[in-house]
Amino acid sequence: MLLRNGSRPLPGWEIRFPVKQAENADTYRVADEKGALAFLKVFHPDRIGADRFTPDGKLLEIAIMESLDHPGIPPIRRSGVLDDGRPYFLADLVPGETLDHRLARVVAISANAVGSLMRELCAAVSHLHSLPDPVTHNELTPSNVVLDPGEHDDDRPVVIDFGHARRASDGAASHLSRVDPHYLPNECYEAPVSAPAADVFALGAIYYRALFGIPPWYAANAPGGQADLRETLLRARLEPLRLPERAIGGNPDATALSVIRKALSLRPEDRFQDAGALLEALGEGIRAKSSTDQDPHPKPVLGPVGGKRGFDAIAGLDDLKATLQRDVIDVLRDPERHRHFGVRILNGLLLYGPPGCGKTFVAERFGEELGFVFRKVRPADVASIYVHGTQERIKQLFDEARRRAPCVLFLDEVDALMPSRDGNLHAAYASEVNEWLAQMSDCGNDGIFLLAATNAPHRLDVAGGRTGRFDKTVYVGPPDYGARKAMFEIHLADRPVEPDMDCGELARMTRGRIASDISFLVNEAASRALAGGAGAIGMEHVVTAIRRNRPSVSADQLERYEKLRETFEAGPR
């Protein structure tokens, strides 16, 4: 930072402290003689590409910002050149924190509040897109949205940092290599692009992040930097966008989710074409609060649910998580070290047990933990009305997985995909089972890991259970005491709860209940508390729900599964 605290680079303005030192500019907080604060940005012109200047030699960022007039964009007070020849601008100071900092603290924002925030943010970007010479921001990320508390502490979003902005007449931005690729559409990875539809994608990604706590198609930072991260994201985006079944801060309505999905379309022509169209859709898709229901503050969502992904979201099942970590995740993440010891990845792992105990949930969290391509396959996904059509689809499934390896194929209801060929199985179905078995054999050598789940392992063809197909079989039964206690804590975490809530006692009262029962009981208790006019969920509400609702799986059924478990664990698996 070239300017020191207390120095006066501009008449009447004093440097109070530096804000940020970047590659091509330094920013400072400054004050005038009356103590009023402002924001100063000083550029290093020798580090800025020629395409970021206007034909008359003015910085494009300054020229664009001086042409803007919207409450969601900080106005420039003055601009010029310092005595040392460096261009600068002085703008109104936005005193709040960035949206990125807010989400780092609270993980997610409540559905109603984020809807209001996104409408205001889209209104600011719509102003850019609707100008006679439309402006594209090109770097819309949570780091470039400041939440201004304003006079009434209402967290108004303000768009900052127009370093990559372009007018339509300026051509495409060619220096997006440092922009977080989670907020860039695929077309911006491959070639310089500057179009309102790219900003729309970024707005959709911000909306997704604020609701669900992570960006869409989230990928951890790659060791090789931005280039590797972009490659990882390109692979992840081969899968359809996943909208979690439950948002951390409460679920938006179905129309709002469809708005997010459209904004995040990977084909530019399928998105809203500008922020104005997105804003119009948001106005229809998100219920506006009435004057008696007004609450302008984005609500932080705290507690155990907030930000939990992957294995952190699974209560209990420590042995299973350890097996998946050791035998699959570690091998895929460090193949060279394991190859040195002659250790190869498991070919497949079969999860079985009573319905509602979390087999599918575990598989999906495993996909999050792993971070590679994860494909869920149900019987309907490969079904075909044509002769040999299903066999062809099975082959295509594995061909695609090999092209995208390392890849996880999760076969849900695997007993329906590969029913036992003993007995009177139709010849067409037997041919389909044969195709599954042929494709599965040693597919781990091609970077494909098979994970499967079934409530009826005895109906699965016996050849599927041999090593080289499903190498290990794991029983997933009703949660134990510790897991039940953790489940109650997780499901109660983002709800109003009375201080007397004792999750340990609730866990003791629910022995034999399956994972889905715990979720249902908490929801039932919440409904009773709400209907009764209570201010929060009390212990009595949950206890009443437990006493009035039978377990979904009876004791006799659990006993049969335990006997089935003994049979499987005593066998050759």
Image: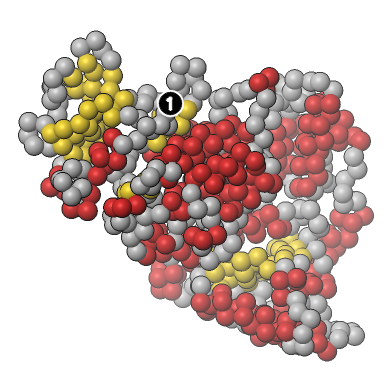
Q: Which residue is mark 1?
A: 148
**In the image, is residue 202 above or below residue 143?**
below
Q: Secondary structure at mark 1?
A: strand
Considering depth in this image, is 461 or 72 the residue closer to the camera?
72
Q: Position of residue 487 (x, y in %)?
A: 70, 41
* Residue type at the position of mark 1: Asp
Considering depth in this image, is 236 or 258 the residue closer to the camera?
258
Residue 397 quadrant: bottom right
Residue 508 can be seen, yes or no:
no
Does 406 sit left or right of 64 as displayed? right
How many numbered tags mark residues here? 1
Considering depth in this image, is 151 or 284 the residue closer to the camera?
284
**In the image, is residue 121 above or below residue 390?**
above
Does 169 sit left or right of 186 as displayed? left
Residue 426 can be seen, yes or no:
yes
Quadrant housing the N terminus: top left
Q: Position of residue 38 (x, y in %)?
A: 28, 23
- Residue at 71%, 58% in the rendered image: 359
